[in-house]
Amino acid sequence: MGQRQRRCPVICPFSPGRGWHIVAGVKMYQLALALPFLLAIGVAAHWLIARVVKAVLWSWSPLATGEPEAAAYERRVYHSADMPMMQIVAAAALSGLPWWVALATGSGLWWAAGFLAIAGVVALDVARWERVAVSAHNLWFQRGYRGRVHQVAMDNIRDASVEEMEVGGFTLRHGRHNRLVRLNVRMKDKRLVALPKTDADRGLDEVEAVANHLRMRLQQLRDSERSRTVQPSGARAKPPVSPSPEEQELQRALNRLRHGALKRAAR
């Protein structure tokens, strides 16, 4: 009777220790779900901000100087499957990681680091920005916003062609099946100038617009040069030059001799 009965230990599901494990598990589950969303937000934020920045920069600093641009195209980051563009897309996705760390740690500094990362990716994108424009008398192109703006006069261009090519790599839109397009310009000294590439699916119409305007202007220049070297058909003929008195007297003598010869032949 004096012995105390031993109780079996029972773990309550709502005990403090077990509750902490549940909260930690829920927290990890939320972080796992938040990671892809934050990476996608980083990509979307870069796409939107970079698009606005490029539009402002092109309006503020167009390629053509002294004459308006007739047609233009640019290399598209999220559609061009070449290594520099894929690096920008990867950097944009990784820029969402600081926000994920901010959710995990609760530190506000990581939120600021995420915005700084987005700004850095936009700066990298602008530094690798490639664009082409054509005006009435020149063809313009630039590789990198701080790069040199190349100006090619129409008089030095022989012809232009549009080139499409299959490429490897990976894009969010086309996966592993990607095509690039660019404008090739042949100079009169037989040099070939390869202009910047862009996605064939979205940028082909813009490249064709630049090529068509360039061909039209080259044809107009050829027609203008031909019209300067060939006399127009509608030009007035020169008036006949009147003969001198000596020539008139010689012509009368020849007529008298001709008439005399005809009279002798008639006899």
Image (spheres, grey):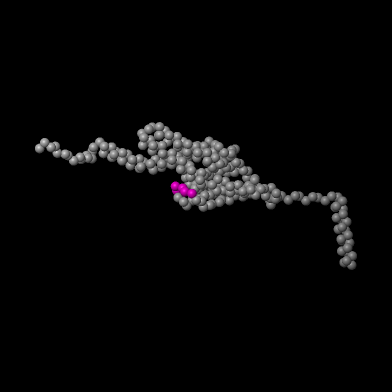
Point 23% across, 38% down: residue: 14
Q: Position of residue 88 (x, y in %)?
A: 48, 42
Point 40% across, 32% down: residue: 109
Q: Position of residue 93 (x, y in %)?
A: 43, 41
Instruction: Answer with left or right where residue 101 lies relative to residue 238.
Output: left
Point 58% across, 49% down: residue: 184
Residue found farthest to the front: 2
Task: Count every numbered label the image shows and give the total.
Answer: 0
Does the magenta-highlighted stretch encompass residue 172? Answer: yes
Point 58% across, 51% down: residue: 161
Main SS, magenta region, reads loop
Q: Pick the residue in front: 178 or 68.
A: 178
**Magenta region, residue range:** 169-174
- 117 over 81 or under it: above or below: above
Q: Pick the residue in front: 222 or 173.
A: 173
- Asked which quadrant contains residue 63, the reply is top right
Does the magenta-highlighted stretch encompass residue 168? Answer: no
Q: Position of residue 244 (x, y in %)?
A: 84, 50
Quarter of the image that includes the N terminus: top left
Q: Is residue 4 visible?
A: yes
Quarter of the image that includes the C terminus: bottom right
Q: Pick the residue in front: 168 or 77.
A: 168
Residue found farthest to the bottom: 267
Q: Is residue 48 visible?
A: no
